[in-house]
Image (cartoon, rainbow, N blue to C red):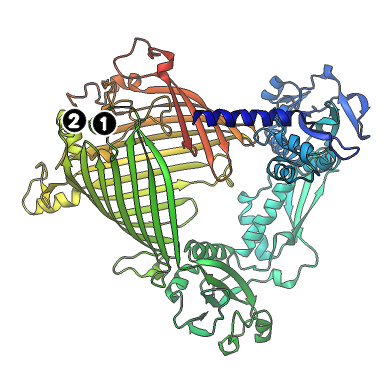
Amino acid sequence: MRRHLHLFLLGLLLLSLTLAGCSTTSHLPEGETLYTGIHQITYLGQGQKPKKIARDTTGVIISIADAAKRVDNLLHGSLEGAFGSADSLKTGRHSETKLSKAEAQALETAAEEVNAVLEIAPNNSLFGSAYHRTPFPIGLWAYNRYVNKPSGFAKWMYRSFASEPVLITSVNPATRIKVATNTLHNYGFFHGNVKYVIEPKGNRKAKMNYFVTPGRVFTLDSIAYRDFPPVADSLIRHSRRESFLRKGDAFSVAKLTSEQSRLEKLFRNDGYYFYRANSATYKADTLVRPYKVQLVMQPKEGLPPLSRERWYIGNTYITVRNSDQQQATNIWSRHGLNIIYSGSKIPLRPIVWMQNIAHRPHSLYRQDDQEKTQEMLSSLGIFSSLSLSYQRRDSLALLRDSTSTAARPNLRDLTVKSGQDTLDLYIDAVLDKPYTSDIEVNVTEKNGDRLGPGLTFSLQRKNAFRGAELLNFKLYGNYEWRINGENTRHNSLFNSYEIGTQISADYPYIVFPGINRRTFRFPTATSFSLTADWLNRAGYFNLFSSGIDVTYSWHRNTTSRHQLIPFSFKYDKLISSTHEFDSIMSANPALYSSMRDRFVPSMQYTYTYMESATVHRNPLWWQLSVKEAGNITSGIYALCGRKLSEKNKNLFHNPFAQYVKVTSELHNTFRIDRTSQIVTRLMGGIIYSYGNTDYAPYSDQFFVGGANSIRAFQIRTIGPGHYYTPKSKYSYMDQTGDIKLEANAEYRFQLFGSLHGALFVDAGNVWLLRDNDLRPGGTFQLKHFLSDIALGTGCGLRYDMDFLVLRLDLGIAIHDPADNHRSGYYNIKKFTDGLALHFAIGYPF
C-alpha cells in the first residue's frame, strides 16, 4: 500500500515538473497579453492635481497624482485614503472639507459597486481573488502544452486540466472604466472618473492599475411630488416617512429606483393594478446651488388611463393538472371560484384554494395579496409549476382571446359578470410527482474515540389526501466502533449501533376540532410525528425510546414565526445495562435520575423574530422558547389526592419528569462594508426541576464548548461553575447544568475570492441551581460569577461555496474556571493545552 502511494506521489511530482517546464504565454494569439490580475485600485482624493500625464501601451491617457499631496491608495477597494490620509478619513475630514455621513456612505456604496466592476479574477486565481494567484498555474501550463495537439492523450489532458487564458482584451479595461465611471455618476459623483494603466509583468504578461477620482458628491436639496391624481397624492403625503429620498442624502439612482418601486407598491396596494414603477419619472436640477440637486417626481407623460384607475377583484379561475400533458376537461364552480381540472376528482380540494388565496371577491386589488397568494401556494410544496395572472373583464371575447383553450376549456360555459373595473384572477398549476425518496449516507465521529457510517432512507407522499398533506416515512441506522486504540473486552467487531424510524404527517393548515380552516388568512401548518429508536451502546446499555409530537406553526408576516407544541410525549426504557454502566450511574445520582426509565409529557412554545438582511443594514434575530413538562400530569394526580410536592409519582409504572425550561437567544449583525461585518450572539437559559423530580432529563440540560459554542474548549469540558472534573472518558457526562449564559462576538471579513477570515471572542458557562456534593463549586453564586466565566478567543477560515460553507476555527483558551489551574486570570498551564481546533460546516451563529 505504501509503495503504491509513493509511486503515485512520484508520478504527480513528475507531471508537475513536466508541466512547469511549459510556458504560460507561448500559445497566446498574436498581439495578445495575458491578464495576471489587479495590482491595485487607487482612490484619488478631492482637490489633488495630476503631476504628469502618461500613456500606456493601449493609448489610454492616465493622470498620476502628486505623491506630496498624500494620495493614499486603497488596496482592494478600502476607503482609507480616498479623501486624504487615514486619520483624516476617520475623523471625517478630507482635504479642507469635512466629509458628511451621507457623503461617506455614498462613497462606501459607490466604491463597492466600482470595485465589483473592475475586479476580474485572472487564471489560477487564489479562491477567486482578483489580486492573488496560486504559484502553480496548472491550467495555463496544460493549455500551452496540449492546445491543438492531435493525439488522444493530449486531447484528454487538454479537456481535463487546461483552462483558457484570460487576456487583457477579454478583460476590456476601456469598457470597464466607462461602466465604473457611470457607476460613480449613478451615486451622485457627477464629476467622478475612472482611468487605468497597464503594468507589464514579464513576457506578454501584465497587471492592471485602476485610478478612481470620485470628486465631490451631489446631495438632495429639495424633493417634490407633482401632478399626481388626488387619491395618489394623498397616499404619497401620508407615506412620506417611508420615502427613500431625504434632504441631505447623496443623490443616488439606486434610491430613485427604490422610490419608484415604493410608489408602485403603494399605489398597487390601493387598487392601481396597471401602475408600474416606470410610470413615475424624475427631473434633477443641479444648477440652482453648487453640488445640490433639486428633485421633482411626477407621472410620466402619456400614461394610459388604465394606470389611473382603481381595480377590484372578480372571479377566480384555477386550472390544475396532474402533468403538463394532461388537458383539464372538468369544471367545478361555486361562489366565484372556478376550478378546471383533469381526472375524476379535483386534485386539490377547493378548501385549500380558498385558504391560500388572499384576495377576496369584490375587494380592491392589493399587490400584498398577490404576493401572499403566491407565497402561500408555493409553500405547499406540491406544484411543479405555478403561475398567477390577472385579466380585465372587458368582454368575453377579450377573455377568450387571452386564454389558451387547452389550458382553460369550456370558458364559454362559465358565468362571468360584466364589470369595467374588475380583474379576474387566473391560476395555472401543475402538480408535482406524488412520490419522492432520498437516501443519505454519512460518516460521524463522536467524542474523539468513536467512528462509524450511517444510512438514512426517507419516502414522501405529497398531497396524500388531496389537501396538500405530506406523509413522510424515515428509516435510519448507524454503526460505530472505537478508534482510540483501547483494548478492552468491549472492543469487538460488533460495537455500538442505532436503529430508528419516524412517521410524520404534515398539514398546511391547523388541524384541531372546532377550528374552521377559513379562519386563518396567513400561512399555518400542523405536524403529527411518531418516532421509535433502539440504541445499543456496546458494553454499557441497551435503550429503547419512543415519542409522539403534535406541532402547530404559523406566521402573519415575514419577521415573526410562532411554533406551539401542545402535546409531546416521550418514553425512555433502559432494556439492559452492564455492571460498568451501573457503577457510573451509582456514582452520580443526578445523572442516574436524568437517564433512568421515565415519561416526559411536555408542552413548548417558540417565538422567532428575524429581520431581513436585504431590508435592514444591521439585521436582528431573536428567539424565545418556553417548555414545561409534567405539570398537567402532576395536576391530574393532585385532583386525585396526591400532593404536588410528592416525589417519584409514576405514570405507567415509570416516574415522569416535571420541570420548566426557558431559553432565549439574540443575534445581531453589524455590517461594516460589503466584505466585512461583526456578528454577535447572546444566549441564556434556565431549567427548573420541581415536584416529581429534582433533575431534568439529560438531553434537556445545558452544556457549553465545541464548534458552535465556546471554541477554545471541546464540547462539554466546561463547568458547571468552577467545578473541576477529573479527566476520564466519562467526565463529559458531569459537565452539564441548569443555567446557561453565553456571549460570542465574531469579526468576519473577506481575505480574497471565496475565502473569508474570522476573529472571535467567546465567553460563558453553565451552573447548577441546587448544591451537589458530587460537583462542588457547580452552583450559581453571584460572588463567583466573573471568575466562573470561561473565556476564549481565536481565529478561523471560511470557504464559501455559495451552497455550503466550510469552516475551520482555532480556539485559544484565556481563562478556565475550573479550580485546578494556576493562579491569575490567564490560568492555562501550557499554551498548547488551551488550543482547540474545530472543523465544521456552516457558521456557528
Looking at the rendered structure, the kind of residue marked 2 is Ile
Who's the residue at 70% across and 55% down the image? Answer: 260
Q: Nearer the viewer, residue 733 or 123?
A: 123
Q: CA distance from mark 2 to mark 1?
A: 10 Å
131 relative position to 335: left or right: right
Indicate which disc residue 762 carries.
none
Secondary element at tag 1: helix
Q: Name the residue tied to disc 1.
A: 733
Alpha-carbon neighbours of circle 2 within 10 Å: few (<14), some, or many (≥20)? some
Q: Nearer the viewer, residue 808 or 762?
A: 808
Residue contact between numbered discs 2 and 1, judged by CB atoms under 8 Å? yes
Secondary element at tag 2: helix
Q: Nearer the viewer, mark 2 or mark 1?
A: 2
Residue 299 visible? The answer is yes
702 relative position to 6: left or right: left
Q: Is residue 441 above or below residue 353?
A: above
Quarter where residue 291 is shown: top right
262 relative position to 613: left or right: right
Q: Name the residue tied to disc 2.
A: 584
**What percent of the width, then of the height, locates residue 602?**
24, 50
**What percent of the width, then of the height, locates residue 413?**
57, 90
The residue sitting at the bottom extreme is: 413
Quarter where residue 113 is shown: top right
Looking at the rendered structure, the kind of residue marked 1 is Met
Earlier sequence position, callout 2 versus callout 1: 2
